[in-house]
Amino acid sequence: MKERERIRQQLIAAPRVVAAIVTAVREQVPAYAVLDDSRLQEVRAIAAWALDRLLHLWVTDSALTPADLRRFRGIAAARAADGRPVQAVLRAYRVAATVMTDEVAAATPPPGAPDAFALARMALTTLDTLAEEMAMAYTATSEDLTADRDRALRLLLDDLIAGRHASVGALTDRAARLGRQLPDPYCLLVAEPADGHGAAVTQETAVGLLGSLDGHGGEVTSLATVRGSRVVLLLPAAAGGAAPRALGERGLRGCAISGESPDRIAVAYRLAADALDTAPAHAHHPARVLTDGDAQVLALLGGRPATTPDQIGRLILGPLVQPGRHHLMEALTTYLDTGSANAAARKLGLHPQSLRYRLRRVSDLTTRDPRDPWQRLTLDIARTIAP
């Protein structure tokens, strides 16, 4: 026993052992390779605790205690909640056990044959117990989540917009277990009472709004939740076009973000929420919702730009920067510089009707009317800061 305790002390005192376990798990288990720093801290803490407990079992020739099993079941339940597959979790423990036995074998001096045999027997027995206990806890938690499906779907979207997920793949698997497919491409719509301080929205508000928009995206893939005084919907991108009418019918206004990648839904939510926080009243219009371009302009005006000037230019000006549309960009620029269609027409040597036709084309292509004060401001900012 003294030799085993000596080796245990060596391994526990060496931070590199836990680091080697975490590195091996990330290299060999794909679900762990994509974890962010906050999740990795949890993995390191669990690895350090598990290493200490397993080595203690080896030293004392004992088995997992009820307290140990409760903790492992709790870990399995947490993994079920965040969508990490149970197969990946159990493989991570097998990888960790392999690293532990390799480190024990590399100790100086190494353990004798009886101690090495005892280590292998302890590892196999413990892993067998863990597999059974953790799989049961994982399954039970998954069934609880699925049983309350509506609540589970809300929690899924809550986790998405808060950034509480290990990977898009894990969330996709979690959604699939609940009978949903995360929309890709997607539109994240955040909506609130149009007067800014109307009656509080409820989950019923969210579900009703979702019902009016879901059919526009084809297959039912949408999710809905409520954050404070706002409704949050994750929709197929195709459903975003129906948002203005659906919001107007319910006395709501909103911001729809569709340009962020699936792994940046939390970023899209913050962008939309900040836009609703800071948009002036005249930025809202019954026939449209705020979009990525509006949100990025508002972030820029607030001194916290969230993207590059050229990206803002592409979001706002869109097709106008494409070849063959220089005449439309010229008409817009001259109109913004002079302040009127007649003055812009005179400067360009055009008939006023020709200038107005070009401005209508600008409006059609950008979905922004240069005559509207807020939309004119966004167009002016975009053409000013874009290369």
Image (tube, rainbow, N blue to C red):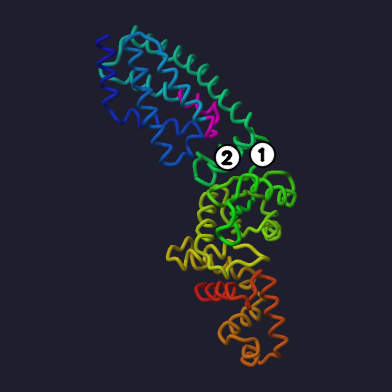
Q: Which quadrant would residue 158 be assigned to in this image?
A: top right
Residue 221 placement, left or right of 261: right
**SS for tag 2?**
helix
Percent x, y of residue 367? 66, 69
Q: Are marks 2 and 1 in contact (CB under 8 Å)?
A: yes
The quadrant the N terminus occupies is top left
Percent x, y of residue 77? 51, 27
Residue at image coords 68%, 90%: 350
**SS for tag 1?**
loop
Residue 387 placement, left or right of 11: right
Magenta stretch holds residue 130:
no
Residue at image coords 73%, 45%: 219
Q: Which mark is residue 156?
A: 2
Residue position for label 1 = 180
Main SS class of the magenta portion in the image: helix
Position above or below: 45 against 222: above
Q: Quick one: label 2 or label 1, which is nearer the N terminus?
A: 2
Position above or below: 385 against 54: below
Residue at image coords 55%, 30%: 85
Amino acid marked by disc 1: Arg
Q: Which mark is residue 54?
A: none
From the viewer's side, name the closer residue of 162 and 7: 162
Q: Nearer the viewer, mark 2 or mark 1?
A: 2
Amino acid marked by disc 2: Leu
In the image, the segment drawn in magenta is 80-93
